[in-house]
Amino acid sequence: MAKSQVIDTHAHWFPADYVRLIEKDGVANGARLERNDKGQTVYVTEKMRQVFDPPMIELDLRLAAMDRAGVDVHALSLTSPMVYWAPPAFGLALSQAYNDSASAAHRKHPGRFVGMTMLPMQAPDLALNELERAAKLPGMRGIYVATNVNGTELDDKSFWPIYAKCEALGWPVFLHPVDTIGSDRTKRFYLRNLLGNPYDTGVAAAHLVFGGVLDAFPKLEILLPHAGGTFPGLIGRLDHGTKVRPELKHMKQPPSAYLKRFTYDTIGHNDRIMMNLVRLVGADRVMLGSDYCFDMGHERPVDVVDRLTELSAAERGQILGETAARLLRIGA
């Protein structure tokens, strides 16, 4: 039997064309570029800073890192601050630069890269048009959406035509935090990431459940980062609230019934937590993730799975790539 591919579903990338567009037109649209004390270019918007680091941009460096880590495929995704900070027209231009570049990376290395489509969700009509365009590009296999869009929650009806199109395409929706909840209280100690990212993921998942998105689109697949954040760990509390709170009387089934409507990556940073997640949702709903190439991720994500010695060989294969291959239509 042929060895299954190892697929990293949480791997960030800044394409060179996206960087050049920021350099050319960013200042006119609310961004600026600075140099840090290491001489690196820093991309600054009103709420966020991000370093344009060569490993995040150059595909040759990425391929070498993938080989060292034993990873066959990256599902490429843009990272913070994404494009929602920008005026809609520039957000669309940034999205198109990213999507065209991701498709080009796939065409150049078809066995190594697929792309998660970026959309200007701050303008849902433009986002839908770009989704329809990007769906025709080789190698694009899903969409990438923040856990909220400039404060608008993901159950907002303006986003539903995008979910409908994804469901029709068979495309998963990969979520990732950008502007996290409680940012006024998480400025110190890197809490915006340490706590803000998993909490915002949980809030987004709850909105999709309680707001009826998963009922309206029963075939839509949602990928939650950071081992699902707070959503799986607080599922008992969500279930209890559904039984007793009048705000949730519209719910026909408990939130736990939706656990397997999501998939979850392996960025939990604790082996017991990861095994608990596998037992809660099933190994077929957990997929490899590295958060390449950030320090809050895993440089060797396969090692994370190898440490889960309670897994069967079949479960290990599902997590390392079989589920991702099915959802992202890799090797089909």
Image: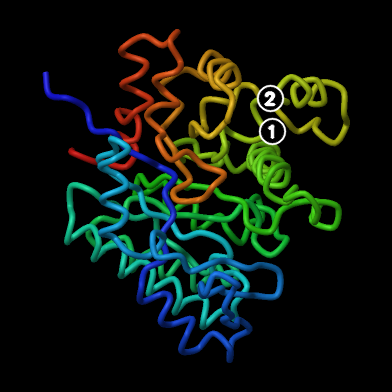
* Residue that carries the numbered disc 2 in the rendered image: 233
Q: Distance between the residues labelled 1 and 2?
A: 5 Å
* Residue that carries the numbered disc 1 in the rendered image: 230
- Camera-side residue: 229 or 32? 32
Q: Which amino acid does label 2 sit on?
A: Gly
In the rendered view of the protein, which quadrant contains the C terminus? top left
Residue found at the very far front of the displayed protein: 38
Q: Height in image: 153 above or below 208?
A: below
Local crowd size for mark 1, using a 10 Å CA cut-off: few (<14), some (14–19), many (≥20): some
In the image, what residue occupies the spot 39% across and 65% down? 54
Q: Can residue 263 be seen in this view?
A: no
Q: Which amino acid does label 1 sit on?
A: Thr
Local crowd size for mark 2, using a 10 Å CA cut-off: few (<14), some (14–19), many (≥20): some
Contact, mark 1 vs mark 2 (Cβ under 8 Å): yes
- Camera-side residue: 249 or 106? 106
Residue 236 coordinates in the image, percent (x, y)? 74, 19
Residue 234 coordinates in the image, percent (x, y)? 73, 26
For this view, does 65 lie left or right of residue 23? left
For this view, does 170 lie left or right of residue 125? left
SS category of the residue bearing label 2: helix
In the rendered view of the protein, which quadrant contains the N terminus? top left
Residue found at the very far left of the displayed protein: 1
- Camera-side residue: 168 or 8? 8
Residue 34 coordinates in the image, percent (x, y)? 59, 80
Residue 292 coordinates in the image, percent (x, y)? 44, 48
In the image, what residue occupies the spot 21% across and 27% down? 4
